[in-house]
Image (cartoon, grey):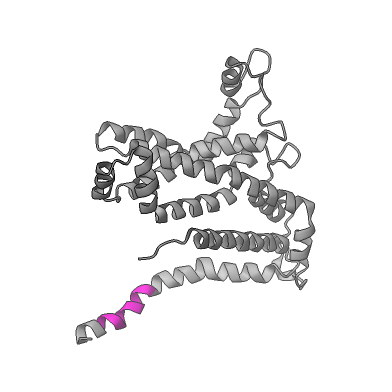
């Protein structure tokens, strides 16, 4: 190593110091405090009066019907959203992956819902899902009625509310995954596609044997990110149904929010947050292990 390289190596930690300091103050220290509070009876307004409870918060949460329902709803929402959104985004990316400038406008159209505020979209879709009330009817019910299906109370029926919110979430988020897939598709070597075409491979054959193996890491990334985002669902059910009817759309994040700010039970909310963190980390590692992400 030359003297100049040694000098650069000695200077490197000083350049990292500001970022490490911010990480320590805004991420590491709050997590350490939250971990400590999760074993206590900490109150949101008076955490200094907390008493040590051991693992009582965790054991109570695992047997609490409301928390388990929130976990089940969130997991079911992720099961509905992740596969559908990933597949739709992949085929949309295949469709718009063309060099002509006109296709860029279509990409923008699919991406617009991603940049619109989620609360605004929640209000808009609440109006779209509006059940029949006299002569007034939401657009969704008007469309299903046009094909012979009776109007439904989409957000008031416990069996339909969560799928309705999942449909809206897929519509809103598919543009982001489409853009990620698009970046992956544009890195696929054109020589491979041309060779497959010369060998007689059809469109589906090129997708199956050339494109999907080439974008394998992109698929793993999209599935992982979509899963994490799906488990973080909060705004849509909170604004559209308030977690109802009953508890059919209560999400984990809403449960933690209400425990913290309505119940002011900081210790229990911190314990729920760490259970949520452990579960999402487990799922992420499991997905990467199953997919066998290639490195380098």
Does any portion of residue 91 appear in the rendered image?
Answer: yes
User: Quadrant where the N terminus lies?
Assistant: bottom left
Name the residue located 33 percent from the left edge and 38 percent from the top edge. 202
Q: In front here: 194 or 55?
A: 194
User: Quadrant where the C terminus lies?
Assistant: bottom left
Name the residue located 49 percent from the left edge and 38 percent from the top edge. 172
The image shows residue 99, relative to residue 62, as above or below, that is above
Q: In front here: 176 or 209?
A: 209
Name the residue located 65 percent from the left edge and 38 percent from the top edge. 162
Residue 137 relative to residue 93: left or right: right
Q: Which residues are magenta?
A: 7-16
Based on the picture, tell me whether residue 266 belongs to the magenta stretch.
no
Instruction: Kindly give the residue lying farthest to the front in the view shown.
Output: 199
Q: In front here: 185 or 57?
A: 185
Please identify the quarter of the rendering in which residue 41 is found: bottom right
Residue 37 relative to residue 86: left or right: right
Instruction: Kindly give the residue lying farthest to the top in the view shown.
Output: 135
The image shows residue 165, relative to residue 273, as above or below, that is above
Residue 155 relative to residue 87: left or right: right
Based on the picture, tell me whether residue 8 belongs to the magenta stretch.
yes
Please identify the quarter of the rendering in which residue 295 is found: bottom left
Residue 264 image position (x, y, % from top left): 72, 57
Residue 262 image position (x, y, % from top left): 72, 51
The secondary structure making up most of the magenta span is helix
The image shows residue 151, relative to residue 255, as above or below, that is above
Residue 143 image position (x, y, % from top left): 56, 19
């Amino acid at each position: 190593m030359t003297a100049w390289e040694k000098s650069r190596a000695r200077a490197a930690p000083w350049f990292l110091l500001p970022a490490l300091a911010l990480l320590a103050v805004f991420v590491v220290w709050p997590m350490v405090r939250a971990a400590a509070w999760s074993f206590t009876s900490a109150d949101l307004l008076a955490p200094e009066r907390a008493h040590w409870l051991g693992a009582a918060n965790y054991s109570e949460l695992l047997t609490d019907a409301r928390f388990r329902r929130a976990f089940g709803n969130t997991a079911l929402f992720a099961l509905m959203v992740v596969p559908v959104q990933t597949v739709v985004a992949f085929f949309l990316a295949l469709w718009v992956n063309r060099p002509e400038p006109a296709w860029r406008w279509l990409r923008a159209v699919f991406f617009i819902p991603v940049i619109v505020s989620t609360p605004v979209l929640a209000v808009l879709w609440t109006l779209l899902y509006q059940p029949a009330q006299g002569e007034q009817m939401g657009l969704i019910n008007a469309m299903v009625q046009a094909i012979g299906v009776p109007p439904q109370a989409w957000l008031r029926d416990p069996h339909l509310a969560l799928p309705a919110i999942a449909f809206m979430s897929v519509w809103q988020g598919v543009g982001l995954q489409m853009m990620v897939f698009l970046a992956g598709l544009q890195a696929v070597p054109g020589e491979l596609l041309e060779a497959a075409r010369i060998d007689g491979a059809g469109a589906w054959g090129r997708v199956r044997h050339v494109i999907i193996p080439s974008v394998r890491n992109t698929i793993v990334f999209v599935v992982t990110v979509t899963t994490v985002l799906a488990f973080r669902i909060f705004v849509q059910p909170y604004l559209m149904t308030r977690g109802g009817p009953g508890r059919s759309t209560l999400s984990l994040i809403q449960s933690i929010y209400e425990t913290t700010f309505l119940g002011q039970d900081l210790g229990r909310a911190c314990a729920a947050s760490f259970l949520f963190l452990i579960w999402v980390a487990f799922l992420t590692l499991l997905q990467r292990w199953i997919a066998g992400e290639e490195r380098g």
